[in-house]
């Protein structure tokens, strides 16, 4: 009695075209938002364009959005399966057939779905913390670059002023037909300092050129008025409220990331434990059969379940349990460390802020430079006073900007640790970054 058997197994797939359409619409909206950033003249505009155009921020945001989508996907039920079996043959000349169709729905036992959702939520929390940390890092770099541009502009102005002064003094000495021993020594001394300043000028110009090229590549396609930005520097430094430090454990991106890794390790342990449980497939089954003139129908319940005999996921559970312990220890240590660091950085910033506020105005030193040059021309001061005055002017600028760069780094690090960026940075750039004197 020959028999022919044909079996078909398949899964019902959900429509996915609506996801493609929404994805394309979202991409179009993102492109429109990105094109809104076309020109930059102020620090606040620069920061907003960095948030829109910086590739690292775009990538971090995409990771966070993808993690959210995957979290939504993790809670979906497994699609049902259609199982069909068709048999044909003959018995004593009569046609024999048998058709069986079953619809099976998979039920995950042992908490697999809950563990999967928990893991997806942990990955979303990690991606969100990474995004916020990346935003803080990029905004810190952007404001640091703006401060560096202002520093280079002011240092170049001071060096150019000194070069012009030396050129005038050298020209005066060279016009004299006869020079005394002291004057010849002064000429050589001025010439040496003049050449040193030219070397410094060349180095600063090169550094400025590289900085502007770096800034231009950070914002491709954006028309940036770098000359206007270079004339803007910090006019007022904000205070850091001690009350804000209470929010460190909940909003700190580093701690949030470590906490997410701890949650992920626990979720993976739960998933490993759940994997030891079988999946139950259950659903209605219909069978049609016939032999010659006799036909029959039967209805029943189809059940399919695997037997966890060979693998109870023991090694996997032990491995994930070790990860839980390691992540817990790391989180506790980092929590204490971050609280100490945030306090120390806040105190250091307050001290530097007081130092910046207490220092004398730059204009008074400019008057001193003019006075020294005038007294040298009248023979009241020697060349050493002129050289020292210009040296102090340049060194004073570098020292001042070194303090400001350190204060800026501490301030933005505290804001990032508090989880406040980017709002306070943009508001600060709008209100407290102003154009400096052209002198």
Image (spheres, grey):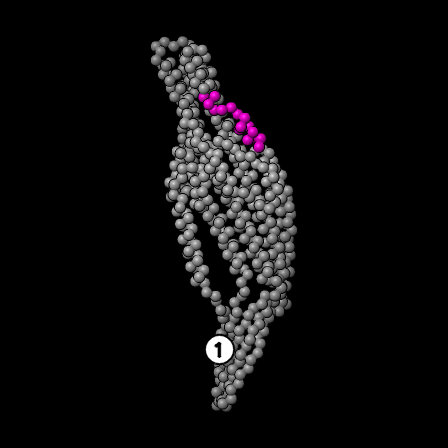
Q: Magenta span covers which residues?
A: 350-366
Question: 37 and 262: which one is in front?
Answer: 37
Residue 341 screen position, x and y as percent: 60, 38
The residue where tag 1 is placed is: 6
Asked if residue 210 shows in the view, the reply is no
Residue at figure coordinates x 40%, y 50% from the top left = 31
In the rendering, at what x and y percent does residue 245 appear?
60, 40
- Which residue is depicted at the point 56% across and 55% down? 121
> In what element is the residue under mark 1?
strand
Q: Residue at x 57, y 58 (%)?
A: 117
Residue 170, how many percent across, how many down?
A: 38, 16
Relative to 295, residue 110 above or below? above
Relative to the observer, which residue lies in front, 224 or 245? 245
Q: Is residue 352 magenta?
A: yes
Whether 96 is among the magenta residues is: no
* Magenta residues, dominant SS class: helix
As drawn, is 414 to the left or to the right of 180?
A: right
């Amino acid at each position: 009695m020959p028999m022919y058997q044909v079996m078909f197994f398949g899964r019902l797939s959900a429509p996915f075209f609506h996801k493609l359409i929404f994805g394309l619409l979202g991409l179009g909206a993102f492109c429109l938002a990105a094109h809104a950033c076309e020109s930059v003249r102020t620090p606040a505009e620069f920061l907003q364009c960095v948030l829109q155009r910086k590739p690292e921020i775009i990538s971090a945001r995409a990771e966070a959005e993808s993690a959210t989508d995957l979290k939504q996907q993790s809670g979906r039920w497994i699609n049902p399966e259609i199982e069909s079996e068709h048999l044909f043959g003959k018995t004593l000349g009569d046609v024999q057939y048998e058709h069986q169709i079953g619809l099976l729905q998979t039920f995950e036992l042992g908490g697999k779905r809950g563990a999967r959702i928990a893991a997806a939520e942990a990955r979303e929390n990690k991606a969100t913390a990474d995004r916020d940390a990346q935003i803080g890092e990029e905004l810190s770099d952007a404001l640091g670059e703006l401060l560096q541009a202002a520093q280079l502009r002011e240092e170049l102005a001071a060096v150019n002023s000194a070069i012009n002064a030396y050129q005038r003094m050298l020209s005066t000495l060279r016009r004299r037909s006869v020079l005394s021993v002291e004057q010849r020594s002064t000429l050589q001394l001025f010439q040496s300092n003049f050449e040193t300043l030219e070397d410094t000028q060349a180095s600063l110009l090169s550094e400025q050129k590289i900085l502007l090229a770096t800034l231009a590549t950070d914002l491709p396609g954006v028309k940036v008025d770098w000359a206007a930005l270079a004339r803007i520097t910090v006019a007022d430094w904000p205070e850091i409220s001690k009350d804000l430090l209470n929010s460190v454990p909940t909003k700190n991106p580093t701690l949030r990331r470590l906490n997410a890794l701890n949650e992920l390790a626990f979720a993976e342990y739960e998933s490993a434990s759940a994997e030891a449980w079988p999946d139950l497939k259950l659903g209605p089954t219909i069978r049609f059969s016939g032999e010659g003139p006799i036909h029959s129908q039967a209805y029943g319940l189809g059940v399919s379940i695997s037997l966890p005999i060979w693998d109870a996921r023991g090694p996997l559970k032990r491995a994930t349990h070790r990860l839980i312990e390691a992540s817990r220890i790391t989180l506790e240590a980092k929590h204490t460390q971050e609280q100490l660091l945030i306090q120390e950085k806040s105190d250091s910033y307050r001290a530097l802020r007081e130092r910046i506020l207490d220092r004398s105005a730059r204009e008074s030193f400019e008057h001193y430079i003019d006075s020294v040059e005038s007294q040298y021309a009248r023979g009241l001061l020697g060349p050493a006073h002129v050289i020292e005055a210009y040296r102090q002017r340049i060194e004073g600028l570098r020292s001042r900007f070194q303090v400001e760069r350190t204060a800026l780094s501490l301030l933005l690090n505290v804001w990032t640790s508090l989880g406040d960026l980017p709002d306070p940075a943009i508001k600060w750039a709008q209100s407290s970054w102003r154009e400096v004197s052209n002198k």
